[in-house]
Image: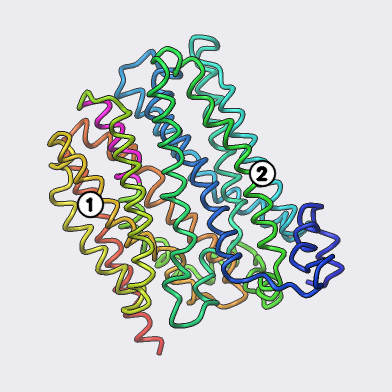
Amino acid sequence: MTASTANATSTPLERDARLVNAGVGHDGGHRIAPGEIAIGVIVGRTSEFFDFFVYALASVLVFPKLIFPYVDAVTGTLYSFALFALAFVARPFGTLLFMWIDRMHGRGVKLTLALFLLGGSTMAISLLPSYAQVGPVAAVLLGLFRFCQGVALGGAWDGLPSLLSLNAPEEKRGWYAMIPQLGAPLGLLVAVALFGYLLAILSPEDFLAWGWRYPFFVVLAINVVALFARLRLVATPEFTRLFESRELQPSPAFATLFSEWRTIVLGAFAPLASFALFHLVTVFPLSWVTLYAGETPVRFLMIEAAGAVVGVLAILASGLIADRVGRRAVLGVSAVLIGAYSGFAPQLLGAGGFGETIYMLGGFVLLGLAFGQSSGAVNDRFPVQHRYTGAAIVANSAWLIGAGFAPLIALFLASRVGLWSVGAYLLSGAICTLAALGWNKDWARRSA
């Protein structure tokens, strides 16, 4: 992409970001430091996950009562989790749409539209009428806005998080791979702290009437900050170099799918252990203790906040460990540990306050170790011309298969069969990860 083309397809915000990076008005030769790039990635991912977890928490604490009051609490939560999964179904459509926008109008236009769609959809949810006001139309509107969130998340994918490790020094690829993953526990920490605070200071009636809407308003302000941080990132010389080398250029999605299907399957299944565990320590346990343990949500949200801090530390540790023993080893060992954890974790969740705490903290340790290295685990197998689009397809597939329906399946199994079945579901994710890693190793040996 030439400079003239880049300018022609830039938004004013991206052009301003490019001027900041060029150091206009200062020394004229400023080069953005790797640490600044990392901060931009973390800010962008934290905003996305904050948006994600605000909706997830409302799926347990608000929507069953507000949108599905005509069914029992468990069924209402299952309906709510079904709508929650819509965003993961919508993500591939968003990727296709916004990759076309990227090719036609540039990455700045793509990111700006995607993040404003994300913020607008979230704001629309904050103004959502209840079932008492509009009847079943409330659920239709919620599903529509949730689908739009998924389209926006698919479009907001910029390729850098999963590709950072490929362009990092060989001895620090594990460290760079975990940097974007920090956004998940940080976004969760902010979301649970905000919901916990509102639940603590408001009466249940006030919280359901208007208090739950406040976190959705906050999302818009955070998205504006994240937008400029990410536009500054894509305006860097480093991003331009990767774009010109075709590592960040979108290729036709279906051509990539047909030619690189084997790598896409491997990439989608390799992180399933961590992606299954992701919702089994963030979303599902809150629904279980709220519905069956009779506990107040505030107490459990504080445990979840502590777990998020543990998750941050575990993700940092995953980067250090991966640079010593390799990313594949970290994914494999963590999958084995998650499989072992699945054998007794359900019993902990059903064992009262102390057991719940151990379940959450232990789960976040394992999640941090596995999730920290789950981004782009096999993306180095894509040829350069398919790397950007292939990485996007892998990310969408992994989230859809591993995480999208996890809260719905887990609550359905736990309510119909028993908590032990949640452990079996988690074990299946660990087995899929180990199988994909084994297939990847065998393929690499035969391809050498």
Q: Is residue 397 magenta?
A: no
> Whole-percent x and y of residue 176?
48, 70
Disc 2 crowd rating (10 Å Cα; few below 14, some 14-19, many 20+) is: some
Quarter-of-image position of residue 337: bottom left
Identify the residue at image location x=27%, y=67%: 434
The number of discs equals 2
Q: Quadrant of the N terminus?
A: bottom right
Mark 1–mark 2 Cα distance, whole angstroms, equals 35 Å
- Quarter of the rendering containing residue 117: top right
> For the residue labelled by badge 1, is the local secondary structure a helix, a strand or a loop?
helix
Observer-nearest of 389 and 125: 125
**Residue type of the residue flagged with mark 1:** Gly
Is 67 rendered above or below residue 51? above
Q: Is residue 416 above or below residue 397?
A: above
Give the residue pinned by disc 1: 362
Give the left or right position of residue 368, taking residue 157 as reference.
left
Instruction: Name the residue located 53 percent from the left edge and 63 percent from the top edge.
Output: 161
Residue that carries the numbered disc 2 in the rendered image: 224
Seen in the picture, residue 102 relative to 134 is either above or below; the reply is below
Residue drawn at 34 percent across, 45 percent down: 279
The type of residue carrying mark 2 is Val
Query: Which range is magenta?
Result: 279-292
Residue 77: x and y, percent?
35, 27
> Residue 184 versus residue 2: which sits nearer the camera?
184
Mark positioned earlier in the residue sequence (1 or 2): 2
Estimate the x, y position of residue 339 in percent, counting from the top left: 20, 58
Please tell me whether mark 2 sits on a helix, a strand or a loop.
Answer: helix
x then y, percent, for residue 445: 34, 86
Magenta: main secondary structure equals helix
Q: Is residue 28 left or right of residue 387?
A: right
Between 99 and 446, the one lying in front of the other is 99
Which residue is rendered at x = 25% and y = 45% of the image? 360
